[in-house]
């Protein structure tokens, strides 16, 4: 492993980090225009697209510490976008369930959201996007080996 190889790895890390930060900051600003913070949006979007979720599992699906889930769920419940429901088979489990108001809200904002993300990614061709997806998946999955 030579110095050039190490420098190339460091450069890749820096470029990847900066690109992620630039895109993520733009998306987070967009989400705030909907009256939500990024975590609230992630929970609502998860419930809309994947259905009811046990509160204990939401954090792992959106990469959030479990202690913060209760706070986020409380905020979304107060806005009327979700409700807690008890699991009929196990009273220790509580599900977060999107409400009709939450579904309507997501259906109003999501088309614009995905359009804006598409615009952000439009600098890359379809082939470049596919190559990026393949390479970034390979990189992400390989990290588990260390």
Image (tube, rainbow, N blue to C red):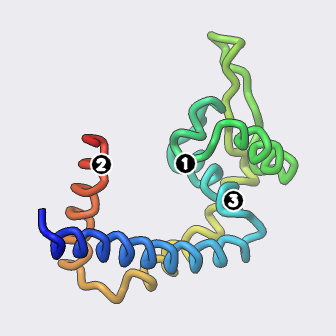
What residue sits right under mark 3 in the picture? 104
Pick the residue in front: 101 or 1.
Answer: 1
* Circle 3 crowding by C-alpha within 10 Å: few under 14, some 14–19, many from 20: few
The residue lying at 13 percent from left, 68 percent from top is: 2
Q: Which residue is mark 1?
A: 62
Within the image, what quadrant is residue 96 found in?
top right
Whether 19 is drawn above or below 90: the answer is: below
In the image, is residue 15 above or below residue 48?
below
- Give the farthest residue toward the right: 78
Q: Residues within 10 Å of mark 1 (few under 14, many from 20)?
A: few
Q: Quadrant of the N terminus?
A: bottom left
Query: Residue at the bottom extreme?
Result: 123
Query: Marks 3 and 1, Cα distance to the nearest angstrom?
Result: 21 Å
Q: Closer to us: mark 2 or mark 3?
A: 2
Q: Earlier in the sequence, mark 3 or mark 1?
A: 1
Quadrant for the C terminus in the image: top left
């Amino acid at each position: 492993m030579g110095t050039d190889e190490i420098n190339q790895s460091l450069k890749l890390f820096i470029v990847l980090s900066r690109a992620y930060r630039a895109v993520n900051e733009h998306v987070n600003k967009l989400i705030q225009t909907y009256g939500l913070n990024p975590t609230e949006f992630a929970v609502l979007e998860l419930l809309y697209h994947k259905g009811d979720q046990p509160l204990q599992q939401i954090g792992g699906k959106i990469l959030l510490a479990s202690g913060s889930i209760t706070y986020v769920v409380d905020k979304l419940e107060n806005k009327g976008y979700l409700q807690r429901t008890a699991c009929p088979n196990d009273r220790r489990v509580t599900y977060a369930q999107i409400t009709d108001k939450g579904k309507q809200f997501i259906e109003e904002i999501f088309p614009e959201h995905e359009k804006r993300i598409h615009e952000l990614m439009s600098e890359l061709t379809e082939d470049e996007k596919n190559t990026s997806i393949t390479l970034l998946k390979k990189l992400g999955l390989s990290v588990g080996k260390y």
